């Protein structure tokens, strides 16, 4: 069976994004790698891998994975601030996360709204990484979203950051390539 792409690429991309979050350790007083990113981004990565094995086209496979990922992200967002109106709930949760971020001292407490904000921004990173690597077939571009958590930590807390904190993103980038 000859495949035109690696069936592991969607899963490797998702795991690379998840493990790149370890660079945020100096900024958060609790664990950064919790079950949420593994479910929200690992499940669509696994679905993308299965669809690649089934020889579903890149675009359709990517769109299905992205839909599942965005659905899981929305589900998690609604669980952070349950309400009757989903749009208001997302906006309120995001605004509360920004407020917690603005008022916190480093390291910030792992407030649910702050963790929602991190998960939301990780979703953007996952979306870009998946789009670049799998759909556009330009894996070298994934360095930008994968290095983003390290870049944020380097700007906010440069004294707390060590070079090994970049290793998960670098290893993930190498695996994507």
Image (cartoon, grey):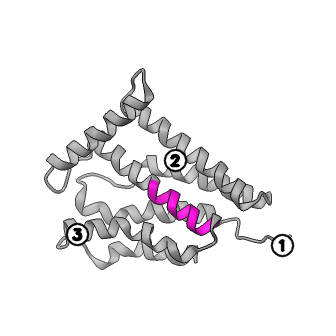
Quadrant where the C terminus is found in the figure: bottom right
- Above/below status of 80 relative to 171: above
- Percent of width and height locating residue 103: 14, 46
Which residue carries the number 1 mark? Answer: 2
Quadrant of the rendered image containing residue 25: bottom left
- Residue 172 visible to an observer of this rendering: no
Q: How far apart, in angstroms, are the residues tagged by discs 1 and 3?
A: 45 Å
Magenta-colored span: 124-134
Secondary structure state at the residue bearing disc 1: loop
- Percent of width and height locating residue 65: 63, 51
Which residue carries the number 3 mark? Answer: 155
Which residue carries the number 2 mark? Answer: 39
- Above/below status of 96 relative to 104: above
Q: Is residue 93 left or right of residue 169?
A: left
- Percent of width and height locating residue 40: 51, 47
Earlier-in-chain disc, 1 versus 3: 1
Is 35 contained in the magenta span?
Answer: no
Secondary structure state at the residue bearing disc 2: helix
- For the stretch drawn in magenta, the main secondary structure is helix
Q: Which of 128 and 43 is in front in this view?
A: 128
- Residue 8 visible to an observer of this rendering: yes
Which residue is farthest top? 84
Instruction: Give the number of the mark in front: 3 or 2.
Output: 3
């Amino acid at each position: 069976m000859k495949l035109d792409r690696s069936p592991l690429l969607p899963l490797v991309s998702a795991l690379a994004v998840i493990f790149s979050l370890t660079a945020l350790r100096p900024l958060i007083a609790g664990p950064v790698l919790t079950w949420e990113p593994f479910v929200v981004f690992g499940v669509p990565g696994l679905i993308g891998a299965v669809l690649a094995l089934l020889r579903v086209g890149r675009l359709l496979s990517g769109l299905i994975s992205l839909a599942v990922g965005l659905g899981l992200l929305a589900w998690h967002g609604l669980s952070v601030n349950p309400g009757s109106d989903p749009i208001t709930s997302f906006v309120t949760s995001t605004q509360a996360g920004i407020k917690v971020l603005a008022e916190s001292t480093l390291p910030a407490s792992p407030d649910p709204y702050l963790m929602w904000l991190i998960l939301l921004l990780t979703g953007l990173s996952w979306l870009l990484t998946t789009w670049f690597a799998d759909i556009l077939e330009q894996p070298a571009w994934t360095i930008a979203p994968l290095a983003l958590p390290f870049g944020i930590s380097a700007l906010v807390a440069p004294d707390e950051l060590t070079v090994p904190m970049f290793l998960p993103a670098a290893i993930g980038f190498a695996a994507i390539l």
